[in-house]
Structures are given as structure tokens and as C-alpha cells.
Image: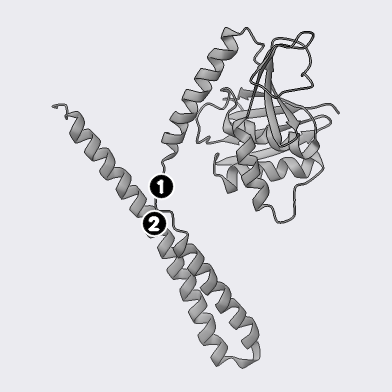
Amino acid sequence: MSERDPETLAAENERLREQYARAKQAEYRRSALGLAGVGGVAALAAILFPSVRSVLFALAATGGFAAVLTYYLTPERVVPASVGERVYAAWAENAAEIVAELGLDGTERYVPREGGVRLFVAHDGPVPDELDGVFQAREGEARGIALRPAGDALFAELEATLTGGLAERPGPLADQLAEGVSESFELVERAEADTEEGGATLAIEGSAYGDATRFDHPVASAFAVGLARGLEEEVEIETVETPEGPAEYVVRASWEA
């Protein structure tokens, strides 16, 4: 079989991306039409059944409003998960090389600070009082690096979608975060949280960003940032692959009980 030239391959990839985007847009618009149909049927039924008119009119209004939102919020551009994974992979590789070059221990600590959370990786010792720079090398304090974690912005988006506010207790908070990474952001196909005294675990399957054991993985990062923000505690995480277990990866978070 003859090899196709790069221009042909690029054109084929572009065609496939456009076809995928059109398919997703069509799916959204079909959903909008379905909701509009439900609203129309409810409005007609309200005319025919006066005894439940108020309920049916409310259903008709809800269906119409949802149809308009679904139609106009249809994404114009769909970015495949593989593209995001490759962007993250470059960041994770660079960060891992920096950690190795500096001789740091590799332990990821998510530290709540005013305005967000900082990811601190140390050579040894406790977290410094100030984390206002990337490279931490003050005399008498632990050396390391302090970065803005990937999960900081993700958590801000998740918090904005919570109607009941952020939970203050570890169990409900971990459940909110598990639902966020799986349902709201679709970073994983399935996520299940569990808590114990001074710690929590997140079992995940179907990671859209590949190997979850890599540095500051978006799923583990969002989980750790959420716990650090909600509990106002320094959270340390470790992610392990569990090929023999019920989930592909388990994120283990711990904090001072």
C-alpha cells in the first residue's frame, strides 16, 4: 500500500475534524428540536385539558426555554480529547524534568492561599509560609517549586456551577468533586469518592487525559484543589495505577486530621 503524502493526510484529518464537529452540532440541535416538541405538545395539551392547564403551561415554557438554550449554546468548535491530552502531556513532562533536575522529592502538596491554591514540591521540610514565587530557596526554609496547579481553574469553574454551595465536610465535598470531574467536565468516564479520617480517595476509570499518575494530572489536581479549598487544609496526593482493581487509577489525598 502506497504512503499518502503529508498534504493528503492533513486534508483528511481536517475533514474528519469538521465531520465530527458537524455531528456534535447536529446532536445538540436534535435535542433542541426534541425539547421544543415537548413544549409544543404540552401547550396543546393545556388547551385540551383545562384542569391541569397551569402545570402543562409551565412544562411548555420550560421545554421552550430549554430548546432555545440548547440551540444557541451549541458549540461551534469541538476539540477532541486527544488534543487536550497532548497539550497536558507536554506540561507534565516538562514539570517532571524540572522536579528531577532540582532533586525534589516529587511529593505534590496542594496548599490553600489567598486567591487560590499553590502546588508545592519540596526538596525536604515543611511548606514555607510564603509561596509567592516559582522557585523557593529562602534561607532556613524548605527548597522547592511553587506552581499554579491545573485544577485551580477547573475548581473555580466547578464551584460556579454548584447550586447548593461547596460542602464543608470531607464526605460530601469529595462526592461533589467526583461528580464534577465525571459529570460536569467529563474528564473521566466514572469516578467514585470515599473518605476516612484525615484522607480521601478517588477511584477513576476512562481518563480523558491518559495516565493519571503523571505530574499534576487534571483529575487528581482538581480533586486535591477542591479538598484544599473546601477544608482549608494542605492536601498531599499520590496517584497509583490499579490494573487488578475495580478502577484504573486511585487518587489518594491526605491532610492533617
Mark 1 is surrounded, within 10 Å at the Cα level, by few (under 14), some (14 to 19) or many (20 or more) other residues, namely some
Residue at the image position 79 percent from the left and 8 percent from the top = 140
Pick the residue in front: 236 or 152: 152
Image coordinates of residue 43 in percent, x first then y, are 53, 84
Mark 2 is surrounded, within 10 Å at the Cα level, by few (under 14), some (14 to 19) or many (20 or more) other residues, namely some
The answer to the question of whether label 2 and label 1 lie on touching residues, with beta carbons closer than 8 A, is: yes
Looking at the rendering, which quadrant does residue 147 occupy?
top right
> Where 53 falls versus 239 (above or below)?
below
Residue at the image position 50 percent from the left and 81 percent from the top = 41
Q: Is residue 246 visible?
A: no
Q: Could you tell me which secondary element the residue under label 2 belongs to?
A: helix
Report whether 68 appears left or right of 254. Answer: left
Q: What colouring does the structure picture have?
A: one colour
Residue at the image position 70 percent from the left and 11 percent from the top = 137
Q: What's the distance in space between the residues labelled 2 and 1, CA to CA?
A: 9 Å
Residue at the image position 41 percent from the left and 43 percent from the top = 79
Numbered mark located on residue 150 in the image: none
Q: Amino acid at mark 2?
A: Gln
Pick the residue in front: 167 or 141: 141
**Mark 2 lies on residue:** 25
Which quadrant of the rendered structure holds the N terminus?
top left
> Where 218 falls versus 135 (above or below)?
below
Image coordinates of residue 230 in percent, x first then y, are 77, 40
**Mark 1 lies on residue:** 78
Which quadrant of the rendered structure holds the C terminus?
top right
Image coordinates of residue 208 in percent, x first then y, are 50, 36
Report whether 207 appears left or right of 16. Answer: right
